[in-house]
């Protein structure tokens, strides 16, 4: 297939996918569960108002939001999912109230009478009592009484009731997380609304707004037929597309690696003189090294909160660094250092590819570096201020903690980061422009490189599409544009093109076949990846059509990973192809490791939780953490490290490296991650999955289940893997510093 045809297919995939993505985004807007103007009882008493619910969402966001438990399955793992927890507790208390209304005690009733009250319970909870004309929800006095009791219960947890001290410790929630009764009352209104969305049937349907999530048979939340149907279809589609891809690969596979007689006798990049702006990217790598260390320490603290929720080995750390902050920093710093390594690679590669250094390019690189530092450390400080309740609703939204996982930055910091990305794009295009004007063999790779850079800069702007009190279903839609399309989508295209550039410039890959391979793999990846965004939204109060599309196209995301073994083998062959290539051993080994983690973390662990029927039971359990760690760090983190190694090879071209130091760093990092995931997170996730299927989702996330001796032991089993990973990262930082001081360098090449 010619490059022209491949470009046509790529354009068709991107345009078609975004038309569908936006169309069903509009459907989400149209069919969101309502936020009622008022919730009243049948005798006319006002229970909550729309403003209470919206302000309550802001209170929840200000304490860390999705870093303190979760809502609708999205968030952290130590505390419960508040929508599932609230709903289950509401059902138990309402059963008692319904029986008491008849002068009976529910727990003393025989099974047949209890069954009758369970039927009444389902009718009470599932019936949609929204009056669309007045936008008012009507509930029974019994349900209002239950809500009052639950408001008191949650106030005791989030404030300072002594009898809840043990439970707060198990949930890693500091005392007085919410400072005032007024704010607590509003957060309770938000919790009650989030639970109402999970149980109330959509108008004209017998399925709730969240497709009957969370699983709880007591209230009739069981998987609807659509989950089984689309799960089965996604598996069949995956098998069919894998077969087609293997057939295509077998029929069209070209030998991409140059034969030994065609390989350069010397390193083609050895004599390339780095420009001033290329040398200026070195400071970015030092910052990456610093952020890796801080992120690792935040991860250690966060993991320890799983076994000692109010302290760090007896030190009351939660008073100044609660779990919601340490987790926010751990996740946000991971994104910061990975993105910084990739952005620095772009700034380094652009002048290297074009052979042109624009005027004031180094000034732009230095200004961008300063802006990066301001955003990173300013946003971390803002998150701390927000969670410590030192900011009001508006100030927290602007400067503090957004409450949404992976995009925790306050709005001002998001805007500044977007401005920085646009500046980065301008610097890239300035340097690439002379090369783009040429019509040589590199042009197709350069165009794809430029387009992916434009997407990286622009798509972060999707995070600005929701506001302070935007409906949560809509905020989730736009959040996943950032997390899935920005982080998992166009960064991956960018990295693929960069790797192809590096290997073709080294003379190891044929330009024509590399161009064809990159274009084809981008088409396959984006064909599933863009609409695969919807698989994050199965149970986020979205229509059934979103579930169908998410199941279908998320299955296609796995298809290109089937052949990733070929890529790993090719990278290994490259590492052995010629004597001088040994200088690039560790960057290439990082690419091989990335292939492994892509197959395991994104492929196996990812598809294990992607089908709707699987995710119905296990969304937000530690199975998600397995996928998250293996994919985010294993794929994107290791790839970022590999790209940095290529840059460092060019910035320190004349000396051999200390193979032992970087070798230990590489192997300990990868082995530590594997040990941590497989002997701790994965067993916990599997046991939670069984509990969710048998007892209900609420139980799998409850302290009752998570605080058993076995589960505590499994959490402690993170320690060996964490130690290996931490030592590996520390050695990597020491190696990077040693390139400057000399201890990481050996004899001349």
Image (cartoon, rainbow, N blue to C red):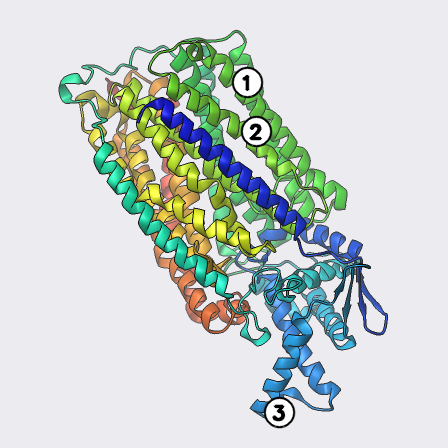
On the image, numbered disc 1 is attached to which residue? 426
Q: Earlier in the sequence, mark 2 or mark 3?
A: 3
| Residue nearest the observer in this picture, 570 or 304 | 570
Q: Residue furthest top?
A: 359
In the depicted structure, whether residue 647 falls above or below residue 535: above
Q: Earlier in the sequence, mark 2 or mark 1?
A: 1
Residue 668 in percent (x, y) is at: 32, 43
Q: Is residue 83 visible?
A: yes
Q: Secondary structure at mark 1?
A: helix
Q: Secondary structure at mark 3?
A: loop
Is residue 205 rendered to the left or right of residue 574? right
On the image, numbered disc 3 is attached to which residue? 109
Q: Is residue 656 visible?
A: no
- Picture quadrant of residue 569: top left
In the depicted structure, whether residue 545 falls above or below residue 204: above
The 10 Å Cα crowd at callout 2, few under 14, some 14 to 19, many 20 or more, is some
Is residue 191 rendered to the left or right of residue 528? right
Q: CA distance from mark 2 to mark 1?
A: 12 Å
| Residue nearest the observer in this picture, 542 or 78 | 542
Q: Secondary structure at mark 2?
A: helix
- Picture quadrant of residue 394: top right
On the image, numbered disc 2 is attached to which residue? 458
- Picture quadrant of residue 122: bottom right
Is residue 433 rendered to the left or right of residue 186? left
Image quadrant containing the C terminus: top left
Q: CA distance from mark 2 to mark 3?
A: 61 Å
In the depicted structure, whether residue 404 falls above or below residue 254: below
């Amino acid at each position: 297939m010619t490059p022209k045809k491949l470009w046509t297919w790529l354009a068709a995939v991107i345009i078609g996918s975004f038309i569908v993505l936006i169309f069903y985004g509009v459907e989400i807007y149209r069919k969101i569960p309502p936020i009622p103007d008022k919730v009243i009882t049948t005798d006319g008493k006002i229970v909550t108002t729309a403003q209470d619910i919206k302000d309550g969402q802001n209170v929840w966001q200000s304490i860390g939001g999705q870093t303190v438990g979760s809502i609708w399955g999205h968030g952290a793992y130590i505390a419960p999912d508040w929508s599932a927890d609230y709903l289950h507790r509401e059902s138990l208390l309402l059963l008692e109230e319904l029986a008491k209304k008849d002068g009976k005690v529910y727990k003393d009733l025989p099974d047949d009478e209890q069954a009758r009250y369970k039927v009444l319970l389902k009718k009470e909870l599932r019936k949609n009592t929204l009056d669309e004309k007045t936008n008012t929800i009507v509930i029974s006095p019994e349900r209002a009484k239950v809500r009052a009791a639950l408001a008191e219960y949650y106030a005791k947890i989030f404030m300072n009731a002594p009898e809840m001290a043990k439970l707060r410790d198990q949930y890693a929630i500091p005392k007085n997380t919410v400072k005032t009764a007024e704010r607590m009352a509003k957060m309770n209104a938000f919790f009650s609304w989030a639970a109402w969305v999970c149980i109330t049937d959509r108008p004209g349907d017998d399925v709730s707004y969240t497709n009957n999530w969370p699983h709880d048979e007591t209230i009739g939340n069981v998987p609807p037929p659509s989950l089984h149907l689309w799960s089965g279809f996604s598996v069949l589609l995956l098998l069919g597309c894998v077969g087609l891809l293997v057939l295509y690969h077998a029929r069209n596979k070209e030998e991409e690696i140059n034969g030994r007689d065609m390989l350069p006798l010397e390193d083609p990049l050895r004599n390339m003189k780095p420009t001033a702006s290329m040398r200026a990217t070195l400071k970015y790598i030092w910052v990456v090294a610093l952020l890796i260390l801080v992120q690792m320490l935040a991860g250690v603290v966060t993991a320890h909160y799983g076994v000692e929720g109010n302290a760090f080995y007896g030190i009351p750390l939660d008073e100044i660094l609660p779990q919601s902050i340490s987790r926010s920093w751990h996740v946000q710093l991971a994104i910061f250092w990975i993105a910084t390594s990739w952005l620095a690679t772009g700034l380094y590669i652009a002048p290297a590819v074009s052979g042109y250094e624009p005027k004031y390019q180094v000034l732009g690189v230095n200004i961008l570096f300063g802006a990066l530092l301001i955003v990173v450390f300013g946003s971390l400080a803002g998150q701390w201020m927000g969670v410590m309740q030192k900011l009001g609703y508006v100030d927290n939204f602007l400067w503090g903690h957004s409450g949404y996982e992976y995009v925790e930055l306050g709005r001002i910091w998001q805007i500044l980061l977007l401005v920085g990305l646009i500046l980065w794009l301008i610097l890239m295009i300035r340097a690439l422009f002379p090369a783009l004007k040429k019509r040589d063999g590199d042009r197709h790779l350069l165009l794809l490189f430029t387009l992916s850079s434009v997407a990286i800069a622009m798509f972060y702007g999707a995070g600005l599409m929701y506001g302070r009190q935007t409906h949560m279903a809509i905020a989730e839609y736009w959040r996943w544009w950032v997390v899935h399309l920005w982080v998992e989508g166009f960064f991956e295209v960018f990295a693929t093109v960069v790797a192809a550039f590096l290997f073709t410039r080294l003379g190891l890959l044929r330009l024509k076949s590399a161009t064809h391979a990159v274009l084809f793999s981008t088409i396959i990846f984006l064909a599933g990846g863009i609409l695969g965004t919807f698989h994050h939204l199965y149970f986020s109060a979205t229509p059934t059509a979103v579930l169908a599309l998410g199941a279908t196209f998320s299955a296609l995301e796995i298809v290109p990973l089937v052949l990733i073994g070929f890529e790993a083998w090719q990278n290994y062959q490259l590492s052995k192809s010629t004597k001088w290539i040994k200088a690039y051993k560790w960057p290439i080994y990082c690419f091989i490791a990335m292939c492994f983690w892509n197959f395991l973390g994104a492929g196996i662990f990812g598809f294990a939780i992607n089908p709707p029927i699987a995710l119905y039971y296990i969304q937000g359990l530690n199975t998600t953490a397995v996928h998250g760690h293996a994919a985010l760090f294993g794929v994107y983190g290791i790839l970022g490290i590999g790209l940095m190694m290529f840059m460092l090879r060019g910035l320190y071209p004349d000396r051999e490296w200390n193979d032992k130091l970087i070798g230990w760093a590489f192997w300990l990092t990868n082995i530590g991650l594997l040990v941590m995931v497989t002997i701790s997170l994965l067993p916990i996730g599997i046991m939670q999955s069984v509990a969710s299927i048998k007892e209900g989702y609420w139980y799998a996330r409850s302290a009752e289940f998570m605080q058993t001796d076995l589960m505590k032991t499994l959490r402690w089993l993170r320690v060996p893997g964490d130690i290996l990973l931490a030592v590996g990262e520390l050695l990597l930082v020491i190696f990077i510093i040693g390139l400057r001081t000399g201890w990481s360098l050996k004899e001349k090449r």
